[in-house]
Image (spheres, rainbow, N blue to C red):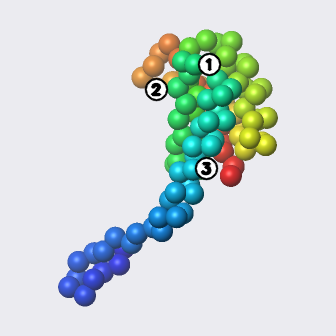
Amino acid sequence: MDQTSDGERAVERLPSQKSAFVSEELSKILDIVHASTPKDAKVSIEFDGKLRLHVDVRNGEDVEVLKKVLPMLGTGVFHGVEVGATPHHPFFHRISALIDR
């Protein structure tokens, strides 16, 4: 943040073109994943210093399929696939992967 002449803090704005580009890229990633997951799968992206994909599915068999399919999607943008619990959804299984873009 920068300070203005009267001592107040001003928020620096990001260029809108770059924001649109990032949104478009994330939408493409979601489209790729949605096309390869069951209809009731919940797909999300999280950023915690690294960009992560989360796919929550009900069926344990879908977990095994997705563990094999994810690394092949989008010319290999998904890696480091892990399986774990789904927060607040005990009847789902979570498959997570790092996203390289």
CB-based contact (under 8 Å), mark 3 and mark 1: no
Near-viewer residue (52 or 19)? 19
Q: Residue at x 50, y 59 (%)?
A: 19
Q: Which mark is residue 87?
A: 2
Residue 5 position (above or below residue 85): below
SS label for mark 2: loop
Q: Residue furthest left?
A: 6
Residue 100 position (above or below residue 93): below
The amino acid pointed to by label 2 is: Pro
Residue 27 position (above or below residue 89): below
For residue 69, what is the image quadrant?
Answer: top right
Q: Residue at x 39, y 72 (%)?
A: 12
SS label for mark 1: loop
Near-viewer residue (32 or 77)? 32
The amino acid pointed to by label 1 is: Pro
Q: Which residue is under mark 3?
A: 25
Q: Residues within 10 Å of mark 3 (few under 14, many from 20)?
A: few
Q: Which mark is residue 38?
A: 1
